[in-house]
Image: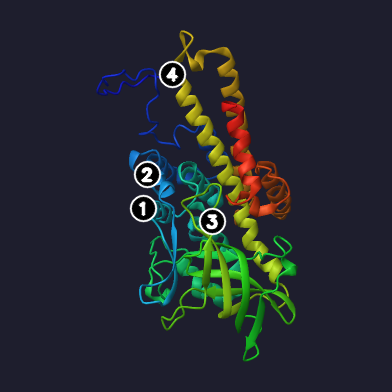
Amino acid sequence: MPTQTVERPISATHEVLNQSVPRVGLDEFEVNLPLLEGVERHGAGWAGERLHHAGRLVGSEDFQRWADEANTNPPRLETHDRYGHRVDEVVYHPAYHHVMRSAVQLGAHAAAWREPRSGAHVARAAVFMLLTQVEPGHGCPISMTYSAVPALRAQPELAAEWEPHLTSLEYDPRLAPACEKPGCLAGMAMTEKQGGSDLRSNTTRATPIDGGGPGGEYRLTGHKWFCSAPMGDLFLVLAQAQEGPSCFLVPRVLSDGTRNVFRLQQLKDKLGNRSNASAELELDSTWARMVGEPGRGVPTIIEMANHTRLDCILGTTAGMRQAVAEAAWHAAHRDAFAKRLIDQPLMANVLADLCLEAEAATATALRLARAYDHDATDQEKLFKRLATAVSKDLSRLECGDLGEVSFLERDQAAGELKQREVVLVFL
């Protein structure tokens, strides 16, 4: 790999030598051979032009600057305006909106639903991986929007109303009625303090309006411990109806322009994923409509959760790719002991191991994405059900058995995790 020389002014104290150079100006799709070959192998070669465009975008200096600025300037919560009115808005740095607009325009949230053809979910997975390789945080609202579509289809009239907005390629971050926006994004609120993943223990109540039932109107009262993508336009929420746990669609803004009751209590101070907001939420007679059958909310919303699990696997794979790419780039641009680092036998072995792990993860992720395609056989659907859970489990970083709270800065487990990594180097 040729080295690059960057002219720098010489300091009065020393000259900076033998340092790497920024890894920019690349087509990240072109240089990721496992991804390029996997896309072709699983029938998505027709998306090559879009993927090369995405690869050049995320490899650009501009996109990488946006990613850095979005994470060094995290979102902030504004619960009230200057006059004391409740607004419950999350304010993001402009760089975050640049990243989000790029992802929406590329169809990272919607291309598989807009183009239901063989390889559609593979092509969409590759775009998602390229984007989250450089900026993972925005993958949350992108994934939530992608995943909401199949769950909404359990209630056809709601899908007909919302799917055109959720599959639009236009980004509009305003809180406004859907009818006034060129495109919408989705979020999800399932877990509660007392239950976590034990969704049947949820205590949020759903009271019917005029009888309720599938597609009917309800009022929700309760709380959610984790609300993903809190500035979305609609949310899928679990609540206890008379028949048991049920799934509901909650819009942030009602059709007459008034704000739905959607009280953001605080933002989660996460260990990573700093550009993206996650919130604690309270609902108080919040207007909603039921999605699917009463008492069948868990199977309905799990359709959404399974698609987000796919994206967890894709995002983890993207992070592995970024790590090995940066490591190899650094080793190719730095000397140690009279050789390039990359030519030192032990370093070559380490890099080879990292490459092998990243390539295996890429092969797994794309094979799994293929099972989500519209033309998947019954056997593929069975494979998808098992392989999604197994692959996510294998790709996740263990942090004890404390669940999501382990990854918040205020939790002891998060500190222990970071300390272990630092101690390896600096003790």
Q: Which residue is mark 2?
A: 63
Label 1 vs 2, first from the N-terminus: 2
Label 3 vs 2, first from the N-terminus: 2
Q: Nearer the viewer, residue 79 or 239?
A: 79
Disc marking residue 334: 4
Whether residue 282 is situated above or below residue 377 in the rendered picture? below
Residue 370 shows up from this direction? no
- Report, in whole angstroms, how far the alpha carbon at label 1 lies from the one at label 2: 8 Å
Quadrant in the rendering for residue 208 = bottom right
Tag 1–tag 4 contact (CB < 8 Å): no
Q: Please state, as top left, top right, bottom left or bottom right, where the N terminus lies in the image.
A: top left
| Residue at figure coordinates x 46%, y 51% from the top left | 275
Label 1 vs 4, first from the N-terminus: 1
Quadrant in the rendering for residue 23 = top left
Check disc 4 and give the amino acid type. Answer: Arg
Disc marking residue 352: none
Q: Nearer the viewer, residue 116 or 426?
A: 426
Check disc 1 and give the amino acid type. Answer: His
Helix, strand or loop at label 1? It is: helix
Check disc 3 and give the amino acid type. Answer: Ser
Q: Which residue is mark 1?
A: 98
